[in-house]
Amino acid sequence: MTKTKEEIRELVREIIAEIAPDEDVSDLKADVPLREQLDLDSMDFLDIVMELRKRYAVDVPEEDYPRLESLDSCADYLVDKFK
């Protein structure tokens, strides 16, 4: 189930859109922290991580959560997990 960085950015956008349906994810800047662009709290963030696990069997240990700060950092971190 190999995915490109752009595909990973898009699947993260889709997950965020489901978790926070009132947020507009179409104009997210890839290099800006998600929490600076969206009204996400820690539970929303945890829901994103849980959806990655549920949908794609991607396990993100708690110590790696900071690596999921922006769309770009998500893609950089997750690309190897989708190989």
Image: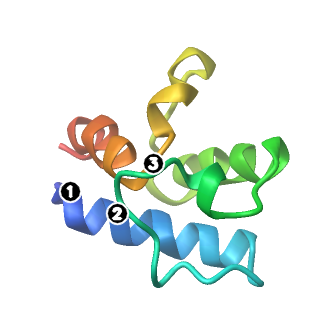
Label 1 sits on what residue type? Lys
In which quadrant of the rendered image does the N terminus lie?
bottom left
Task: Identify the secondary structure beneath mark 1.
Answer: helix
Name the residue tied to disc 1: 5
Query: Percent x, y for residue 53?
Result: 55, 46
Image position of 22 (left or right of 48): right
Where is 83 relative to 65, above or below?
below
In which quadrant of the rendered image does the C terminus lie?
top left
What label does residue 38 carry, if any? none
Label 2 sits on what residue type? Arg
State if disc 1 and disc 2 touch (CB < 8 Å): yes
Whichever of labels 2 and 3 marks the residue nearer the N terminus, that label is 2
What label does residue 9 carry, if any? 2
* Residue ID at (80%, 41%): 42
State if disc 1 and disc 3 touch (CB < 8 Å): no
* Residue ID at (41%, 68%): 11
Residue 56 quadrant: bottom left
Name the residue tied to disc 3: 70
Residue 61 quadrant: top right
Whichever of labels 3 and 1 marks the residue nearer the N terminus, that label is 1
Query: Percent x, y for residue 74?
Result: 39, 45
Q: How is the image coloured?
A: rainbow
